Amino acid sequence: MKGKNSKTIILIGLLIVIIVSGIYIFTNMGKKDTEIADQEVAETRNINEPFYFSEEFLGEEFHDFSCQEFLATYKSEPVKITHDSSDDEYYLMNMNTKEYMYKIPDIDMILNSSYCVDEEGVFWSVDYDKEVKKVIVKSYDDEGREAKKIQLDDFKGNIFDGGYIQVYRFRVDKDFVYISSSTEDNPVLQIYTKNGNLKNVYEGIGDFDIDNKGKFFIAVLSGPKYDYDFYGFLKIDAASGSEIYRMDTDTAIDFIRYNPAENLLYCINTMKTKEIKTYDAEKGSYIKTVFNFIKDSSYSVENTYINDFLADDEGNLHLSFTIRDEEEYIHYFYNYEKIMGEEEKRPITLTVTAPYRDDFIQEAIIKYEKKYPDEKIEYDYTYSEKSSYNEHYEIYAPRFVLDLIAGEVGDVIFGERSLIKYKDTARTDAFMDLKEFLEEDPSYHQLNKEVLNGLKISEAIRAIPLNVNYLFVEVNMDLASQLGLDIDFDNMTWREALALLRIIEEKVPNTYLFSDSDGRFNWEKFLGKTILKSVIPDLVDFEKRKADLNQEWFMELLKTVKECQKSQNFITPNREFDLIDNLQGALFYVDGTDSNYGDLLVNFCKHNKDHKSMYIPIFKGEINNNRGWGSGLMVLINNRSGRKESAQKFISFLLTEEINGLSTNNRVSINESSFDIIADKSMKKHRISKDYDPEGFQNAQRLNGYIKDISHKVDYFYDVDDLVSDIAGPLQEYTEDKITLEEAISKAQSNVMISLEE
């Protein structure tokens, strides 16, 4: 099957056969000694033995100091910097045993541009000294006192305004200091003596590491502006500067780490191969691929920035990363324990089909198989990243329908609203009716009933959303107060909202009714199609497959919108993109909870430091409420499956408070208790607490309350994007005076009927 994934990967060691050819330059005794040495190295590395990795999530932490490195080797043990909130102290924590090995006595030891721990367990730091205007390297004793101070001459890296340097990596051995830092053009590695004299400079490097024996390894960048014409790494003697060897790896190396116990180099490529490969540190030759991020991790490396990485003496892997587009100070830590031997093979008990690999599903499968060790889930997806799926949607969607008809899909199917097309799917028997299963599920009392009721078609529920996109309106309370508005925003219709434009024109003519990213009203853009979603249920009868757009109230609403468009106060022109200030002075901003909830929360709190806003449910339709919601990820059971019981067991697991509340399910969850977990995690991650940030804490509590209230005021699933498109085109022509209202209604009516009859 495509894209098979599992928690672990069996990595069968390959016998390394060394062929010695050419001219013999060694004596027989030397040859024998070399063979013995190679044999000892092979045994140490366990090259010939099978092994696999077991993933362990250590948790997430907030670190706002500038140092980019968080992992180190301390007295031959892998450690990470961790903050203990119980005593407000920082420690080096053993990543294998989870025990504290060293209490950092002075926070300044790690608040510099970078720090490192040398082979003897001595702490070092590097930073720019504004007084002497020099880069200074310091060492510390066990009590945190300064032990040695080295002033570096002729520093080649950037020294930014304000007096700071950007250090990518920093290492110290017995004789030399190694610093990789930014420059105007290329990353540069500088090597200094312990007296502070500049020894050598290497430009265009991606990463480096040292062997603590006077040798170092640099991963080089290739391109016109770099000094190298290949991707790979070099081994260099620090004292002489002579190159020992170079290895062309064909792909860029993001991280290179030396493991002295195995005498191996571990190299990470996150862009192309998305693998960790090992190389012989003595000769530079390729050994094997030991890890594949797509198959062996529960998260997507394409959505992360790896900050630090190391392999310990036992060959265990340790990683630290941040999430793209998330607060940069939130760091996630993972262990991968190397387990010798072959993993016991289990027969597949369930197959799940999805268009692309999703971190939440991957993590849930890992946890499910840990809880039920006798069960094995095959994760069958076509694309390893959602971005690839989006690019190929027009190809994948019809093929998915054909596979479904042919029965060539798994027992459980995951998909987004655009793929599932629920209002059509629910009228077939392709998927199992889950209503009875849900009502008997142990987590049913925690699930949002308004959402589930909105999924009922002919009393059947054939899909379950794992997270929900609730439409809402952000209200500028400062402007509302200035306008003297004393109204019930929660129960406002679209027509009533549009009527407020006249008050703005009269009282505050320099502001706007709506803030919209497009800068103008468009029926096919967010504001326009949101209005349509609120009225379509009163225009279309899905059961009878009929539509009636020629209704007086609808035509009056369209006239009102067109009249509003003539006002310069209707929508913000040339709106700047700003996630914190979406309103930008306007009264309303329409949005949804279809992004990371932590981002939504922190942006709301930041905005409400200097402003006052609130969230209300999306405006009601003109006849009925019609407050819709959407779904990010939906799960269904193939009605042809012979494993329905196992499928229900897995879905039940996904709906539990713990699993639905995983950080990877970072939108608003269907399980309301899980939402409390996600909201609490988001607050902790962003240091929003009653003690640390009381104002932020109060605003976060307000937002959580708004979202809960909004989630209970929805009444239908807005799976109507095709009908929105059918209606939007003619209406756009009407508002641009290209056709009359009657012509627009006629064209839209015809479009809708064609869609309903398909």
Image (spheres, rainbow, N blue to C red):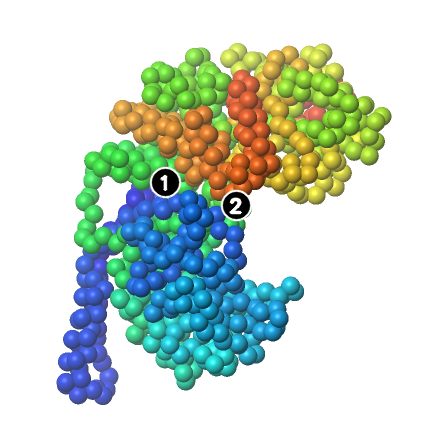
> Does residue 421 appear in the picture of this structure?
yes
Residue 28 in the figure: left or right of residue 22: left
Residue located 41% across and 33% down the image: 661
Q: Is residue 274 visible?
A: no
Residue placed under numbered mark 1 in the picture: 362
Q: Earlier in the sequence, mark 2 or mark 1?
A: 2
Q: Amino acid at mark 2?
A: Glu
Q: In the shown orientation, is residue 439 left or right of residue 194?
A: left
Q: Is residue 345 left or right of residue 674?
A: left
Query: Residue at the location (46% across, 69% down)?
Result: 146
Q: Residues within 10 Å of mark 1 (few under 14, many from 20)?
A: many
Nearest the viewer among 468 and 623 is: 468
Q: Is residue 109 above or below residue 517?
A: below
Q: Amino acid at mark 1?
A: Gln
Measured in 3D between alpha carbons, the distance from the residue under mark 2 to the one under mark 1, in whole angstroms, is 20 Å
Name the residue at 33% across, 26% down: 652
Foreground of the two, 176 or 697: 697
Q: SS class of the residue under badge 1?
A: helix
Residue named by callout 2: 326
Q: At 66% across and 15% down in the image, what residue appears?
A: 622
